[in-house]
């Protein structure tokens, strides 16, 4: 997409709406990361206030990147393991058709993907056997053990069950909480999108969104904007695909 055309995209990001949802509230002034200073407006009652004009700018850049990513049929994985955001992440990912991790990040998910993939394949094999009734031959005790194993696999791998290869990008909702995911993504040259609160280094990721990563309303606002872009990009991609099929049939 040409640069001039990019600049015309309106994602309807409202500074007033962001303020209403509390995106501007950072951490205590003692917890500031030096590299977040360019994104700060000031301090209020000992709390750093994020400059929402800067947030608007950075969120716009991030949405453009996500739009291109989805339009090119590339894979995005969302990571959010904070207790208050788990259900939100899961629902968001399912609505957008994304891979996700909402429970604890398993070390080696990227850096030791071969081993992780084998465990996922075993999980899927067990699920398949259960759906076909192939586990009925086992004793009640053995089936209970397998069911318990399946529940554990679902908790660990449910959101990445369809991950056949490493994703093209990850979207991390808390840089501090899920720093291992960020480290592994860097090791594998996977693009990193992240919400950057005042206690984190925004320069350590490819696309940072300066915002409150604790408040649910703040996270919801950002996810709402990302969802709008993803669904629109997917819809356009489907329309193009249909038009291409029609042209082929006509020729």
Image (cartoon, helix red, strand yellow):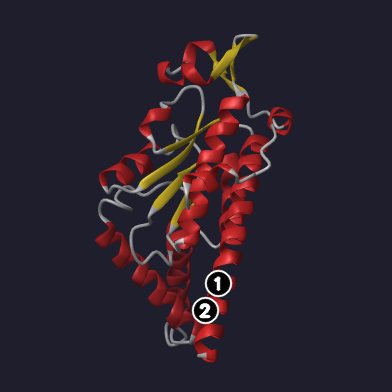
Helix, strand or loop at disc 1? helix
C-alpha span from label 1 to label 2: 6 Å
Q: Quadrant of residue 146?
A: bottom left
Q: Residue at 53% of width from left, 11% of height from top? A: 29
Q: Residue at 47% of width from left, 38% of height from top? A: 194
Q: Is residue 187 visible?
A: yes
Horizontal side of 183 relative to 19 (left or right) equals left
In the rendered image, the vertical position of residue 56 relative to residue 81, given as above or below = above
Residue 147: percent from the left, percent from the top?
Answer: 48, 70
Q: Residue at 59% of width from left, 48% of height from top? A: 226
In the foreground, 92 or 85: 92
In the foreground, 141 or 59: 59
In the foreground, 29 or 38: 38
Which residue lies under the disc numbered 2? Answer: 244
Horizontal side of 119 relative to 67 (left or right) equals left
Which residue lies under the disc numbered 1? Answer: 240
Q: Residue at 35% of width from left, 71% of height from top? A: 121
Horizontal side of 193 relative to 238 (left or right) equals left
Q: Is residue 99 visible?
A: no
């Amino acid at each position: 997409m040409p640069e001039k055309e990019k600049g015309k995209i309106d994602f309807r990001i409202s500074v007033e709406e962001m303020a209403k949802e509390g995106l501007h509230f950072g951490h205590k002034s003692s917890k500031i990361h030096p590299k977040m200073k360019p994104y700060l407006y000031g301090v209020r009652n000992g709390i750093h206030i994020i400059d929402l004009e800067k947030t608007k700018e950075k969120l716009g850049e991030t949405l453009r990147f996500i739009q291109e990513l989805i339009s090119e049929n590339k894979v995005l994985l969302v990571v959010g393991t904070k207790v208050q955001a788990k259900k939100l992440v899961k629902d968001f990912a399912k609505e957008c058709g994304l891979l996700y991790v909402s429970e604890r990040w398993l070390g080696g998910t990227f850096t030791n993907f071969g081993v992780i993939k084998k465990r996922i394949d075993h999980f899927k094999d067990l699920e398949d056997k259960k759906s076909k009734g192939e586990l009925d031959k086992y004793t009640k005790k053995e089936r209970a053990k397998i069911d318990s194993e399946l529940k554990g696999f679902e908790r660990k791998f449910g959101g990445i069950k369809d991950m056949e290869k490493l994703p093209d990008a990850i979207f991390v909702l808390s840089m501090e909480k899920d720093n291992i995911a960020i480290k592994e993504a860097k090791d594998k040259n996977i693009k990193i999108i992240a919400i950057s609160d005042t206690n984190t280094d925004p320069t350590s990721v490819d696309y940072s969104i300066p915002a409150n990563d604790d408040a649910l309303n703040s996270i919801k606002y950002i996810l709402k904007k990302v969802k709008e872009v993803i669904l629109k990009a997917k819809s356009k991609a489907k329309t193009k695909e249909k038009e291409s099929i029609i042209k082929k049939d006509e020729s």
